[in-house]
Image (cartoon, grey):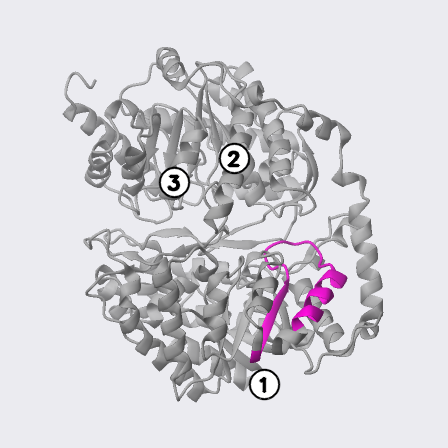
């Protein structure tokens, strides 16, 4: 049957786009600037060139209005703090002296000044810089970045749509500044903030922007009546401005719920809604609210967070239903394409059949354009594309890769007993203390050590055939020996082999498991200049052979101190991959857990007494609505226990988490039943230690005292001060001393100095403890 053309010709658009460039040109330019090899003018020109290339590509693909202002040197929330003048007092002098250097100081800190706190952007693996606000905060408008980028696009002949983080989301993401009462609510600053947004909107209107997009993803979370009233007031005021562009309020990552009615009634000109993550929720709610008469609806029907091809017929059915609910319906992805790689056509090593199933940012843009054309002109106008899409979807559904009967039989045979340790923690703890013989306040690291230029060169040499496997392994052994030697000399108690053989904490394992696919160019921004290549989880998972035993055993042969085995947990293996969407996540997690269980058991059999299974993604994958938390946490914690419960009582199981709101999941952390957990705490001033204490967490914990995402070297005094704060919440008998996270991104000089200070701080605090504590 042929769909009827839309009353108003549908247009294609996107909310935002990857920033890095085809070859991560932005990362290289910024890091070159930090090292003094690239000057500010060259950095700005690289950035401008990347923006021009993105807009040109989008326009040539058929996108009508291109997003501007979504480009960032580091983080778009940090850009918003600059736009509204919310610069912390400790960074004000640096910003006043040099705006660019001050910007990076807020992001990374300096030796003398700590950076802003960093945490996850909703339930993604993107990290944002947390605004610091207080009752004395004074907002001032700085629209220079937004106006400049809007003007650039106009000069090139494009139709720009500047993108701003909305005022409600900005305030809800903020935290009280250091020294401000913990119960201060940044949302109380709304009336001060709105005039600044009004000024920015007026500046953009004067610069030629017809539309401005205000992103409000915080409204898809559970919001109180007061917060919804604040949203209504904000958009009533902004929508009522005389001198403004048209306003498109965008939400994504889920269902708006009650907030949809608030925004539908507001005097704004359009809404952008997610019709992928929300299921039928936003569609049903929109119909119940009476639609958006007289307004523009941007329909996010192409998944902006995963890399599978769109189902055109399903999307067109949704779009057809939406036609009667708004004055005009345009087509987009469900969120910014920042969360997917740039171009699937760059992947030359993936099986051509499988490549047909993949859509990165460039392909998703093409899908959006096809859907807009089909919506505007009827399905006859895209008959060839529809036929090809049906064939590609059928190819994936019928592929042998997706189903392994042996894996499914093993998963179906899981029992409750498989997810429980043989003894309770109190008995295990005594056995572990006797077996390991560690001092009070034991020191360790999270796992990785600096990935030096020499290591990256060795991997490149192996791929290029300049060295053989034997030569490569000798280089890895040399690095492990150096890492072990340093740790022993520094005085660390539980050692790691440093992971020199690993390219990434997820990719390394994915490359050794069935069901996963690796990309060569699938880079996605995690934070700042840190990019990762999430593997593609396409089919059933199993472990053909041991993955880490060889190198862990080699490291243990070099020292009498315990060496931790290091693995990535099942939830993180899912969250930091592009996961299959054809079965429940819990089913996939159990498959990964069983593969990891085999590895944990083999590590123990090889003589490894301490095994760390990292789950930094446990909090970030938490659904945005509280009603969905219990079901998620049930399978998430079960999968961790399934991976780790097959060991003896005297084998110590660690886990690690970083840069998340841990207070939301303290019970789940308890339910993991790990013997020791290490967590980020340096930037958040030991907040997690207090949260664990308030919960009554009974096990051992290492809240970090060294912020590894900053080039700063923490002094012995600074680390000791953090430890003292930690001891206010966690008794010395259960407190570990460690960095916030792995050291892969740091250089050796700062790593050596920081860890030596960390060990010195632990010794200093041990000496202060009463005799009975020791």
Q: Report how far apart the C-alphas of labels 2 and 3 lie in the structure.
A: 40 Å
Return the x and y of residue 365 as percentages of the image width and height: 66, 67
Q: Secondary structure at mark 2?
A: helix
Within 10 Å of the Cα at label 2, are there few (<14), some (14-19), or many (20+) other Cα atoms? few
Which residue corresponds to mark 1? Answer: 157
Earlier sequence position, callout 2 versus callout 1: 1
Q: Report how far apart the C-alphas of labels 3 and 1 lie in the structure.
A: 48 Å
Residue 308 falls within the magenta-colored stretch:
yes
Earlier sequence position, callout 3 versus callout 1: 1
Query: Which one is in front, 629 or 465?
Result: 629
Number of marks drawn: 3
Which residue corresponds to mark 3? Answer: 748
Residue 118 falls within the magenta-colored stretch:
no
Query: Which one is in front, 289 or 609?
Result: 289
Determine whether 415 is above or below 110 in the image: above
Q: Can residue 50 be seen in the rendering of this structure?
A: yes
Determine whether 596 is above or below 429 in the image: below
Which residue corresponds to mark 2? Answer: 634
Q: Report how far apart the C-alphas of labels 2 and 1 lie in the structure.
A: 52 Å
- Of badges 2 and 1, the one in the foreground is 2
Location of the N terminus by quadrant is bottom right
- Residue at 53% from the left image edge and 80% from the top image edge: 160
- Of badges 2 and 3, the one in the foreground is 2
The image quarter in which residue 83 lies:
bottom left
The image quarter in which residue 234 lies:
bottom left
Q: Secondary structure at mark 3?
A: helix
Earlier sequence position, callout 2 versus callout 3: 2
- Residue at 50% from the left image edge and 66% from the top image edge: 260
Determine whether 608 is above or below 25 in the image: above
Location of the C terminus by quadrant is top left
- Residue at 49% from the left image edge and 40% from the top image edge: 630
Q: Can residue 505 be seen in the rendering of this structure?
A: no
């Amino acid at each position: 049957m042929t769909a009827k053309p839309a009353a108003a010709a549908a247009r294609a658009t996107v909310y935002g786009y990857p920033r890095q460039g085809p070859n991560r040109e932005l990362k290289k330019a910024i890091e070159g600037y930090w090292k003094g090899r690239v000057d500010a003018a060259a950095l700005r020109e690289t950035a401008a060139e990347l923006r021009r290339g993105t807009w040109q590509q989008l326009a040539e693909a058929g996108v009508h209005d291109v997003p501007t202002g979504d480009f960032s040197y580091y983080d778009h929330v940090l850009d918003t703090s600059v736009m509204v003048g919310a610069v912390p007092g400790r960074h004000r002098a640096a910003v006043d002296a040099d705006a660019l250097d001050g910007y990076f100081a807020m992001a990374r800190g300096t030796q003398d000044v700590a950076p802003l706190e960093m945490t996850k952007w909703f339930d993604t693996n993107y990290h944002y810089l947390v605004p610091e606000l207080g009752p004395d905060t004074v907002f001032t408008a700085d629209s220079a970045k937004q106006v400049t980028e809007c003007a650039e696009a106009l000069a090139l002949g494009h139709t720009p749509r500047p993108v701003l983080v909305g005022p409600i989301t900005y305030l809800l993401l903020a935290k009280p500044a250091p020294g401000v009462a913990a119960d201060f609510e940044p949302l109380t600053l709304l009336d001060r903030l709105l005039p600044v947004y009004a000024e920015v909107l007026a500046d953009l209107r004067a610069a030629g922007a017809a539309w401005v997009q205000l992103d409000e993803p915080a409204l898809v979370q559970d919001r109180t009546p007061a917060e919804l009233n604040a949203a209504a007031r904000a958009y009533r005021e902004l929508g009522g401005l005389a001198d403004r562009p048209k306003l498109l309020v965008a939400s994504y990552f889920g269902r708006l719920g009650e907030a949809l009615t608030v925004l539908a009634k507001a005097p704004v000109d359009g809404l952008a809604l997610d019709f992928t993550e929300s299921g039928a929720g936003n569609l049903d709610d929109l119909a119940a609210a009476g639609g958006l008469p007289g307004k523009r609806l941007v329909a996010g029907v192409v998944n902006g967070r995963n890399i599978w091809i769109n189902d055109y017929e399903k999307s067109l059915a949704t779009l057809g239903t939406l036609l009667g609910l708004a004055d005009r319906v345009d087509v987009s992805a469900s969120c910014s394409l920042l969360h997917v790689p740039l171009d699937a056509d760059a992947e030359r090593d993936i099986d051509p059949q499988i490549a047909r199933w993949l859509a990165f940012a460039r392909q998703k843009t093409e899908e959006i354009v096809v859907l807009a054309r089909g919506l505007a002109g009827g399905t006859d106008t895209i008959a060839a594309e529809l036929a090809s899409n049906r064939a590609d979807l059928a190819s994936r559904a019928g592929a042998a890769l997706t189903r392994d009967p042996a894996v499914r039989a093993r998963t179906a045979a899981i029992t409750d007993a498989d997810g429980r340790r043989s003894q309770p923690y109190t008995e295990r703890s005594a056995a572990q203390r006797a077996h390991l013989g560690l001092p009070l306040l034991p020191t360790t690291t999270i796992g990785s050590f600096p990935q030096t230029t020499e290591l990256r060169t060795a991997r490149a040499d192996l791929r290029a055939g300049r060295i053989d496997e034997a030569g490569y392994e000798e280089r890895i052994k040399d690095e492990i020996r150096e890492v072990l030697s340093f740790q022993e000399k520094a005085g660390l108690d539980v050692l790691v082999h440093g992971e020199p053989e690993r390219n990434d904490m997820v990719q390394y394992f994915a490359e050794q498991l069935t069901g996963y696919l690796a990309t060569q160019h699938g880079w996605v921004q995690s934070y700042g200049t840190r990019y990762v290549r999430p593997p593609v989880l396409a089919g059933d998972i199993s472990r053909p052979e041991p993955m880490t035993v060889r190198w862990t055993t080699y490291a243990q042969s070099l020292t009498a101190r315990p060496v931790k085995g290091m693995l990535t947990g099942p939830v993180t293996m899912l969250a930091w991959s592009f996961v299959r969407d054809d079965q429940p996540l819990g089913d996939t997690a159990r498959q990964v857990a069983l593969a990891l269980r085999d590895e944990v058991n083999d590590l123990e059999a090889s003589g490894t007494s301490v095994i760390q299974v990292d789950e930094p993604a446990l909090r970030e994958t938490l659904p945005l609505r509280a009603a969905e938390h219990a079901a998620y946490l049930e399978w998430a914690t079960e999968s961790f226990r399934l991976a780790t419960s097959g060991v003896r009582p005297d084998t110590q199981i660690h886990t690690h988490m970083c840069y998340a709101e841990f207070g939301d999941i303290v019970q789940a952390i308890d339910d993991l039943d790990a013997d020791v957990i290490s967590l980020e705490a340096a930037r958040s001033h030991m907040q997690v230690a207090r949260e664990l204490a308030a919960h009554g967490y009974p096990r051992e914990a290492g809240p970090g005292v060294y912020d590894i995402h900053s080039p700063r070297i923490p002094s012995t005094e600074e680390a000791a001060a953090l430890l003292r704060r930690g001891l206010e919440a966690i008794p010395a008998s259960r407190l570990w001393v460690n960095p916030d996270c792995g050291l892969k991104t740091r250089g050796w000089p700062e790593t050596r100095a920081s860890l030596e200070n960390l060990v010195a701080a632990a010794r200093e605090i041990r000496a202060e403890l009463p005799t009975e504590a020791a």
